Amino acid sequence: MSGPTRSPPLYELSHVSKSFGERSARTMIFDDFNFAIAKGEFLAIMGPSGSGKSTLLNLLSGLDRPTGGEIRFEGNRVDNLRGGRMARWRARHVGIVFQAYNLVPVLSALQNVELPLLLTNLGAAKRRSNAQLALQLVGLADRVNYPPRKLSGGQQQRVAIARAIVSDPTVLLCDEPTGNLDRATANELLTLLQQLNRQQGKTVVMVTHDPDAAKYASAVRHLDKGLLTQVARTP
Amino acid sequence: MTILGLIRKNLFRRKLRTGLLLVTIAVVFLLLSVLASFKFAFDVDSRAADTRLLTFNRISYSEKLPIAYAAQIAALPGVRDVGYSNLLLGFYRTRANPVAIYAIDPNVFLTQHAEDVLVGEKERAAFAADRAGVLVGSGVAQRYGLHVGDPLPLSLAGVVRSDGAPSWRFQVDGIYRGAGRIEPIALYIHDEYFDEARVLDRGTVDMIWVRTKPGVPPDQVANAIDARFRNALAETRTTTESEFARAFVAQFGNVAVIIAAIALAAAATVLLIVTNTVMISFRERIREIAVLKALGFTNGKLYRLIFGETLLLSALGGIAGVAAGALMISALGQSSNALFQRMTLGPVIPALAVLAIFLLGFLGGAFPATRIASVDPARVLARE
């Protein structure tokens, strides 16, 4: 893969501000925040609690809206998308992996992975085969009919990753994806994310507390009090 | 997996709760079906004629009219023929076997009611010729195993015989059927025979039946009859048979109101139960809803899931309830009670049930659906 910094930016955040609360109790998270993420990058964002990591991820996924400024995705503004248009943009371009997996307990692994495909025009057979392929990609081809409660934490997170990639999104946004896993399982997961980045060309943005996890990324940025204070690169 | 599959999985994620809810809905639909059928059974008999007039005492139905009025009415212009009847409560063998008895003038009355009292010519002639004869409704004949030629001992409530005998002896001369599917349960005896044998109220009748000549407005004849007996000892009130039937049913108006109130209370209760249960389920799944939103599900798609769930729930419960109601109505129809025999599911109750299923589905899901838009996935998923 060519150097990610030479690619045109996938995300471009210009003069973004974000605050919570009303006037007297307003908490400013970002103020005149400028940031770009290149296409094909595997970016780890580290920082202490309350630094704005998750807020940044929410802004990137469209789950939250900036108070001011612009967010562009592939050159197009997305911060002003509303309701159904925002949901459709997210379904098309963004795959999200949560720390707590967030699988639907009454559905099998395969059915969980099929969920995002219900938003597409694919037929039932195609949805099923795509979901099977995604599970195969994360190494769970033999667990397709297992409900989440019968899977280990690492396996559940793999299902969550399969769900995030099944509709072939442009970017994977991962919020502490290894936060609930032991070291060995975490390393397996991070290797999987690295493979998705390197082999499938997926842009990955990962928020983490864990310096060992950050080592798997192609770039690491530290966020503190809404400011990017340090940039580091893995060898 | 399909959207319907997802709805089904969500609905049955807590099988006991959903099962109990389905039973509740089914019981309410069963109740509503049976109550609706019961109410329809009260409705006016559509076959009640507008050309047949009924004359009775102006004071009340229980007051008598002199039998001599029949001849005076027959002499009025526009009158085709005049019959009369006394309605009696009788008992076959024991007081556990009550029967309704009409004491009539056989020739005119049976002619006037030829479309409602279906009996063979031979049997009708035998009855007309036999003062102690009785025409038995097929429902009574079936119930007590009566056949033509059988003796039929009856005691009559509130009627004392002049010879002091406790009961009346009749003979079954014929068995008649009604025009509808209901097996008739009344008996017809000769009023002349009855009147001669009783001590009190001789020469009186409960009701005079009048048919008008073709082309003569019934109201005009009714007014003429009532005018004829104005200021007489027994003033009359004359109405068409259909009006009479409506007035008779109106006496049970409070029953209809009670039925409607019970049905409304049951429907409101089940609506609250469904709404509450769906709300509980919604709160339990708020995180999943946030995840679905994060995956790109629009509010519209989520509304479909919620309404799909409540519609599927009400459809399953409603269909089961109406099916059980149909079985119960059918079982009630086998009884000897005329009202129960008249009960039927018909096309109206299933149509109303479909409407109720949709209403319950939409109203039950409406409140949870209004909360969908307010689910903020960023806030909900932040609580990890």
Image: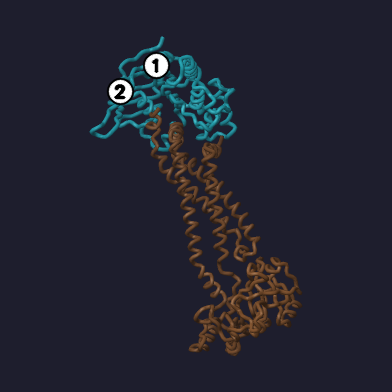
Chain colours: A cyan, B brown
**Rendered image quadrant of residue B329:** bottom right
Question: Could you tell whether A204 is left or right of A145 in the image?
Answer: left
Image quadrant for the N terminus of chain B?
top right
Image quadrant for the C terminus of chain B?
top left
Q: Residue furthest left?
A: A24
Question: Picture coordinates of residue A34 (x, y %)?
Answer: 31, 23
Question: Picture coordinates of residue B14 (x, y %)?
Answer: 52, 37
Name the residue nearer the viewer: A2 or B205.
B205
Element assignment for label 1:
loop
Q: Residue furthest top?
A: A235
Task: Name the residue that disc number 1 marks.
Answer: A210
Question: Picture coordinates of residue A57 (x, y %)?
Answer: 38, 26
- Same chain check for tags 1 and 2: yes
Task: Name the residue that disc number 2 marks.
Answer: A226
The kind of residue tagged 2 is: Gly
Q: Residues within 10 Å of mark 1 (few under 14, many from 20)?
A: some
Question: Could you tell whether B2 is left or right of B287 in the image?
Answer: right
